[in-house]
Image: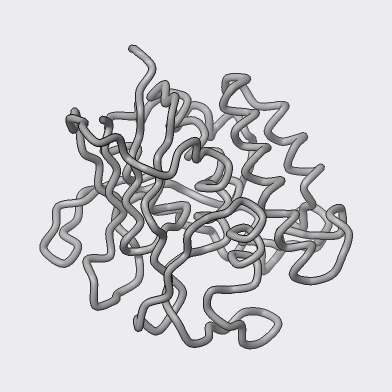
Amino acid sequence: MAEQTLYIECYSGVSGDMTVAALLDLGADKEVLLKGLKSLNVKGYSIEIKRILKNGIDACDFDVILDESIFKNHDNASDINRNIYDIYKIIDNSSITENAKNISKKIFKIKAVAESKAHDVEIEHVYFHEAGAVDSIVDIVSAAICLDNLEINDVIVSQIYDGCGFIKCRKGLLPVPVPAVINIANEHDLNIKNTDNVGEMVTPTGAAIIAAIITKKTLPNNYKIKKTGIGAGKREYSNDGVLRMYII
């Protein structure tokens, strides 16, 4: 497969699961993905990949289904509250390609740096807690595996639409865009646009993936679309709720 240019259209925001779904829809190898995830030796989840209609649009849906009982009944919190260096070890000990490992670790570092700034703690004290750690690991590593499998060379990203208002988190209410997304956007010069959709359309994982892989900000004057991939989001807003990607 020749090196390819990817255009990501973020008019319904961006999240980890939307990104993976769109990359699978573009043709990333599902079996390569599942084999790579298995090699992480991370427990407490299953994967469901299916087709759905999202606001009338046929889309791929990538769902990380967590076994909540594992986390609720776990006695040793240190096993499930992982910092970035714990996650690096998981990635390095897996069988995914070196390129996929590097992409994964770059995304995690961007996210951890943004969270450390948001909460005013050192990066080693940023913990990906319990179920959220598994969710982040699976989404980020899945995106990296798929990007590597598709042999993506350049990545162009549209303006990134987010919502407004507030969302609930473990520590209370956060304004939208959430602080980690703002930090990622500022550090990596991402173009975030607020809309009147109430809620979070851009997750820290989604923003970190974009920041790690973007190489260009504008489309060429002339291009041809070779293939389209559409990934479904989980939330309902007034817009279409999908992430569209194009191989150009």
Which quarter of the rendering shows the C terminus? top left
Residue drawn at x 75%, y 54% is 113
Residue 142 higher or lower than 238, as above or below: above
Q: Nearer the viewer, residue 92 or 194?
A: 194
Query: Residue at the location (24% across, 78% down)?
Result: 238
Which residue is nearer to you in this view: 11 or 46? Answer: 11
| Location of residue 193 with respect to 5 vertically, above or below | below
Left or right of 77 in this view: 243: left
Q: x%, y% of residue 186?
A: 63, 60
Residue 115 position by quadrant: bottom right
**Quadrant of the frame with the N terminus:** top left
Horizontal relation, residue 21 to residue 155: left or right: left
On the image, the x and y values in percent for residue 22 come to 32, 44
Residue 162, position as x, y percentages in the image: 43, 70
Q: Can residue 30 be seen at all in this image of the molecule?
A: yes
- Name the residue located 71 percent from the left edge and 82 percent from the top edge: 171
Disc count in the image?
0
Q: Position of residue 240 (x, y in %)?
A: 22, 66
